[in-house]
Image (tube, rainbow, N blue to C red):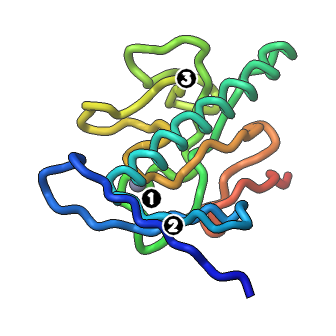
Amino acid sequence: MRKKKFEFDEVVNISEKQVKNIDVYNLEVEDDNSYCANRLVVHNCITEMSYAMNNGYMTSVSEANRKKGKKTYFVYSGGVDRGTCKFCEAALGTVLLWSDKPLGDDKIKDVHSTTAIWRGKNNVGRKPWWICFPTHPNCIHYPEEIDPVLEKWDEEINKIIFKVD
Ligand SMILES: [Zn+2]
C-alpha cells in the first residue's frame, strides 16, 4: 500500500487574525504532495480560479455565437444547499444577456433578459452586489448557456429544461 506523505508548509504574514488551515490535495500526483494551506489563501485561489474560468467560458461561448450573428444568453446556474446564500438563491435562474463591452449599469431592455453580463463584471468593492461570476468569495454558482427561445429554467429541479408547447 502506498504510504501517504504529508508536508505541512508554514504560511506566514497572511492575516493578523488566526485563520484555520485546511488540507489541499493533489489527487493527480502518485507521490502525494498534499499540503496544508492557509484557509484564506485557499479561498482566494478558488475565487480567482472561478473568476478566470467563468470569464473564459463566457467569452469563448459569446465569440462563437457572435460569428454566427447570435446573441448570447447565460443563466445563473448551480444548486442550492445549506451553504447557499440568500443572494445566490434569489439569483438562480436569472437569464443574462452577454455584452461585448462593460456597461455602467447592468439593467437592460431585451425580450428575454433584464440583466447584462460582460467579461470582468465583478463585485469588488460593490454594495449591493450585482450578478457576476463569482458573485462573492467562494461562490460556487456558474454561468450556463441558455437558448431562451427553446429553453427555460426549472425552479423545481434547478436546471435548464426544454420548453414544451
Ligand atoms: Zn452566494
Q: Secondary structure at mark 3?
A: loop
| Cα separation between marks 3 and 1 | 23 Å
- Residue 154, picture quadrant: bottom right
Whether the residue carrying mark 1 lies under 8 Å from ligand 1 is answered with yes
Q: Secondary structure at mark 1?
A: helix
> Which sits in the foreground, 45 or 74?
45
Estimate how packed mark 2 is, as few (under 14), some (14 to 19) or many (20 or more) residues with alpha carbons within 10 Å: some
In the image, residue 116 sits, relative to residue 93, either above or below, namely above
Q: Earlier in the sequence, mark 1 or mark 2?
A: 2
In the image, residue 5 sits, relative to residue 43, either above or below, namely below
In the image, residue 40 sits, relative to residue 35, either above or below, namely above
The amino acid pointed to by label 2 is Val
Residue 80 marker: 2
Q: Quadrant of the N terminus?
A: bottom right
Estimate how packed mark 3 is, as few (under 14), some (14 to 19) or many (20 or more) residues with alpha carbons within 10 Å: many
Q: Residue at x 51, y 67 (%)?
A: 80
Left or right for 62, reference 129: right
**Tag in front: 2 or 3:** 3
Read off the residue under disc 1.
89
In the image, residue 35 sits, relative to residue 164, either above or below, namely below
